[in-house]
Image (cartoon, coloured by chain):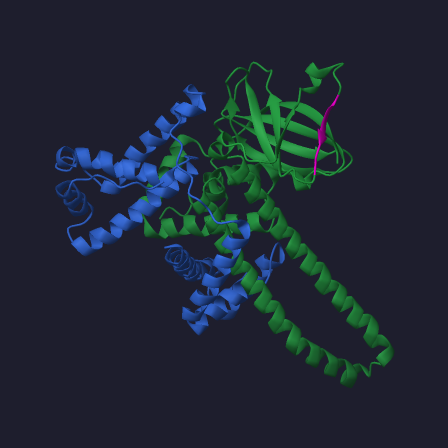
Chain colours: A blue, B green
Amino acid sequence: MARDSAIPPESFEEILAWLNPDRDVAATMYVQLRHDLAKMFMWGRCADPEGLTDEVFDRVARKVHEVRPTYEGDPRLYFRAVANNLIKENHKKIKTQLSLEDIDLPELPIIATEDEMAAEVEECLQLCLQKLGTDKRALILSYYAKEKQDKIDHRYELAQKFGITVETLRVRVFRIRESLAECIRRCIKQKRK
Amino acid sequence: MNEELLTDAVLREFLLGRLDDEERARIESLFLTDSEAREKVLVIEQELIEDYLEDNLPAEDKQEFLLRYGQTAAQWQQLRITEAIKNWALKENAAVRTVPTEVSTWDRLRTRLWLRPAFVIPIAVAAMVAIIVAGIWLNSGMKRATLEQELAQLNTPASLREVPAQTVLLELSPIVVRSAQPQAELKKSADTRLVELHLPWVQKERYATYRAEVHRVGGGELLSIPNLKAETDGRYQIRARLPAYILTRGQYLVKLSGIDLGGAAGITEEYTFTVDD
């Protein structure tokens, strides 16, 4: 679970400045970096991606004053190295401590029942679809018209129709779907407040 | 972006945790620093999710997938959202196709083939059957996803620490050990909500996680529960919870496999029990 990170304001500012001199750009990079590190923890089969992401930032915050002046290269790679160490620590902990009581398991949130969750997602999907432009909505509809093997040919034909490569088509659809999914997540969060 | 490195196949292997440390580090670094590479990884991830939802993943890939994408409530919510978007699109497409098709096909058949009314009924029946089959297929996919989600939630370490009411415990012994002991029998009542299987592990080898596959004897695999952890209080055993409603009268076989940190399956123990309701 994500916890309140205790990064002192001056360290946080230094992290932002390290990511990019432009504070607005740095803020965007910070948000994306958090998302990407959480993905890394998920791929690394860690039970609490959000909590571990907080831990990365806490650790970097403690070192940023000394590391930043001498570090060469993209600072995000330093964050990756810290995250990688945490993944190894996490695996080692599971391997060496067989007692479940000793493992730092995330607190499971109270989740909605299956029916409630389905209804919640469906309701938010309908709301978010209304905000989606006609072209984008039509593209998503066409893209998902087929499943399994049929979809490969179908998407190839669709790309040809638009005069683009399949690669470009799937990136385009990915961006639309991501914004739709983000809208649904925000809507669900709002409803649960 | 290094296109050679980031092929779809390599990225799938990466997302399922099958690359060596060096390859993984290279892709992770690109993912964090190269926006084009990042987007490509996320596109392939989304396709992997779609394949899972369409039940298109081989068993080993599905196992690896669930270890990464089916562990937390947020991850399940993400799967639900993708499923909802896909289902909405399929439903809309089906609706759009059905309405004009009924008119145009009808007209075309009448005008071009002078189709007699006698042919119309079989065609209509065939179309109805196709729609019903598609409906059943979609419904079964939803049910499978729902059951997998339910199993994952029932078997998280936090859930297993609680013992909900109407839970029946069933002690099983590995087939090699059981020898002359009678076969375990589950007697369900109408109130039984959950069944908790106690599966002692008598092998010397220990694993990071275990996967239990429940088979109905004479049928296929009924369900699979990944990511189970062993307990060491008293004896080394694995607990697995199932919703009681899926167990109907008959004989069942449980295959419990050890899964190492790399995700590879190791030794498998087998247990049997019968259900008499």
Quarter of the image where one finds residue A46: top left
Q: Residue furthest right?
A: B118
Residue A137 position, x and y percent, is 47, 69
Which residue appears at 50% of the width and 32% of the height? Answer: B162
Between B196 and B112, the one lying in front of the other is: B196
Magenta residue check for B186: yes
Between A128 and A16, the one lying in front of the other is: A128
Between B85 and B24, the one lying in front of the other is: B85
Magenta residue check for B209: no
Q: Is residue B56 visible?
A: no
Tell me which segment is drawn in magenta. B183-189
Quarter of the image where one finds residue A128: bottom left
Residue B205 position, x and y percent, is 55, 16
Q: Is residue B116 above or below residue B145?
A: below
Q: Is residue A166 visible?
A: yes
Q: Is residue B144 above or below residue A151?
A: above
